[in-house]
Amino acid sequence: EVCLKPSSVARFEDVRAAVE
């Protein structure tokens, strides 16, 4: 996760927000 790029992390957070 830490090695992911900022854009990937941002999308991951967006997906996590959608799940919640």
Image (tube, rainbow, N blue to C red):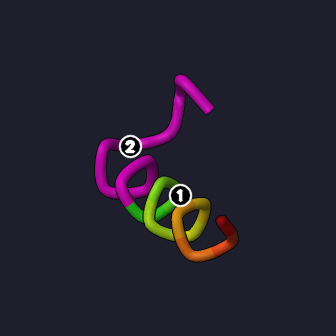
Q: What is the secondary structure assignment of the residue under circle 2?
A: loop
Q: Is residue 2 magenta?
A: yes
Q: Is residue 19 left or right of residue 3?
A: right
Q: CA distance from mark 1 to mark 2?
A: 10 Å
Tell which circle, 1 or 2, labels the residue nearer the N-terminal end.
Answer: 2
Instruction: Name the quarter where the C terminus is drawn.
Output: bottom right
- Which mark is drawn over residue 5? 2
Can you give x and y, in whole percent of width and height, for residue 5 in the image?
Answer: 38, 43
- Which mark is drawn over residue 12? 1
Q: Residue at x 68, y 71 (%)?
A: 19
Q: What is the secondary structure assignment of the residue under circle 1?
A: helix
Q: Residue at x 57, y 76 (%)?
A: 18
Furthest residue in direction right, as rendered: 19
Q: Which residues are magenta?
A: 1-10
Amino acid type at circle 2 is: Lys
Q: Residue at x 62, y 33 (%)?
A: 1
Amino acid type at circle 1 is: Phe
Q: Is residue 10 left or right of residue 3?
A: left
